[in-house]
Image (cartoon, helix red, strand yellow):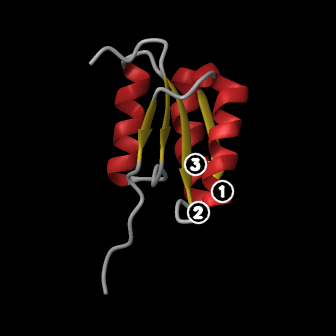
Amino acid sequence: MDVRNRTAVVTGAAGGIGAAVARRLLEGGARVLLTDLDDTRLQETAAGLAASYDDRVVARAADATVTDDIQGLLDLAVEALGPVDLYFANAGVGGG
């Protein structure tokens, strides 16, 4: 899939699969909004990605289970990066 000049939102992006998806999208030329509940880890991940892709990375902590949070993320993505083309609902909770 050609993601050049596309805008993506990736939930659960502070680490693991979400961070890997965000990195691959950026490597492919996409603009990416990263989000996660863990703002400290999210900002660390975003800073690492921004070192190479600074003008195409935006990060905002949010809860992917809260409709108003998701709407806020979509609004931010459009404002900062352009219309959203891809949405990766990666956030999840492990364990019981």
Determine if residue 11 is in view: yes
Residue 65 versus residue 90: which sits nearer the camera?
A: 65
91 sits left or right of 36 in the view: left
Q: Residues within 10 Å of mark 1 (few under 14, many from 20)?
A: some
58 sits left or right of 20 in the view: right
Q: Which mark is residue 31?
A: none
How many circles with numbers are drawn on the protein?
3
Q: Which residue is situated farthest in the bottom direction here?
A: 96
User: Which quarter shows the C terminus?
Assistant: bottom left
* Residue located 38% across and 52% down the image: 90
Q: Which residue is situated farthest in the left direction here?
A: 1
Q: In the image, residue 38 lies at what x, y percent? A: 57, 63
Say if mark 2 contacts mark 1, CB within 8 Å: yes
Q: In the image, residue 3 lies at what x, y percent? A: 38, 18
Say if mark 1 contacts mark 3, CB within 8 Å: no
For badge 2, the amino acid type reads Asp
* Residue located 44% across and 39% down the image: 87
Instruction: Using the numbered discs, state the Cα–Cα distance from disc 3 to disc 2 in whole angstroms.
Output: 18 Å
| Label 2: element kind | loop
For badge 1, the amino acid type reads Asp
| Label 3: element kind | helix
Q: Residues within 10 Å of mark 2 (few under 14, many from 20)?
A: some
Query: Which of the two marks, 3 or 2, is nearer to us in this view?
Result: 2
Dot 2 corresponds to which residue? 63
Q: Which mark is residue 44?
A: 3
Instruction: Using the numbered discs, state the Cα–Cα distance from disc 1 to disc 3 in whole angstroms.
Output: 21 Å
Q: Which mark is residue 69?
A: 1
For badge 3, the amino acid type reads Glu
